[in-house]
Amino acid sequence: MTQKIVIVEDDPTVCDMLALNLRAEGYEVLTAEDGETGLALAREADPDLVVLDIMLPVLDGLTVCRILRRSSEVPIIVLTARGTESDKIIGLETGADDYIVKPFSLGEFLARVRAALRRGKGPEDHTSVVSGDLKMDFISRRVFQGENELTLAPREFELLASLVRNKGAVLSRDILLARVWGDEYLGDSRTVDVHIRWLRQKLEKDPSHPERIITVRGVGYRFEG
């Protein structure tokens, strides 16, 4: 089953950015813009993780966190512009599992999400994915096409994993760069095209006419089974 994440954030730009990138990672994402709505959503949806801003209208994030902790062990990541040690202590003692200070990098955020989910309901639900004759095992980092094991470099594996986990969805070069190379990567986005070409040489019957990794001109790439 797809893991579910609730984001409670009143800044629509931040909320949309986080939701977009989490969905690109394969998570189901629900959002709320105030603490009261977020609390109700978290109770109703039974999520695997709650991402919670502190400065929220109606109910502040610490109050939401405190109330949730009375009846739920769901992992909670708190987002805040307050970065003092006392603020962090208050947040953690209220029941938060992690505390991220704004501004933060997307790479750091996604890493914290994965770590919180591992600590929460156990290991990620999808330890492997099968698509047609292709099987990816994310624990052993092995890829099979039919009976044949493919030899992929680490970046190739991560790139293919991002595409396969989001089968049918178009992922832009910028999103793929953030997922595979990290937010701090300063190179050209054409490095994605180069690695896609290498993947096609290993996956496609005819790399010049790909049937699995499809180019969406002006946007990015889409994986088809």
Image: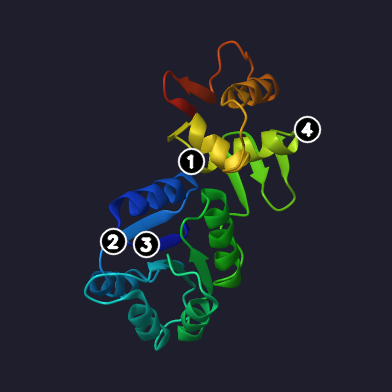
The residue that label 3 is drawn on is: 7
Q: Where does residue 200 sit, x and y in percent of width and height?
A: 64, 21
Q: Earlier along the polypeptide chain: callout 3 or callout 1? A: 3
The residues tagged by marks 2 and 3 sit, at their Cα atoms, a distance apart of 10 Å
Residue beneath the point at 39% across and 79% down: 65
Q: Amino acid at mark 2?
A: Asp
Pick whichever, 55 or 73, lies toward us: 55
Residue beneath the point at 53% across and 20% down: 211
Pick whichever, 11 or 64, lies toward us: 11
The residues tagged by marks 3 and 1 sit, at their Cα atoms, a distance apart of 20 Å
Q: Secondary structure at mark 3?
A: strand
- Whether tag 4 and tag 2 are in contact, CB under 8 A, the answer is no
Residue found at the far top of this picture:
208
Q: Amino acid at mark 4?
A: Thr
In front of the other: label 2 or label 3? Answer: 2
The residue that label 4 is drawn on is: 151
The residue that label 1 is drawn on is: 166
In front of the other: label 4 or label 2? Answer: 2
Q: Earlier along the polypeptide chain: callout 4 or callout 3? A: 3
Image quarter for residue 218? top left
Q: Where does residue 132 sit, x and y in percent of width and height?
A: 57, 34
Q: Secondary structure at mark 2?
A: loop
Res. 10 mark = 2
The residues tagged by marks 1 and 2 sit, at their Cα atoms, a distance apart of 27 Å
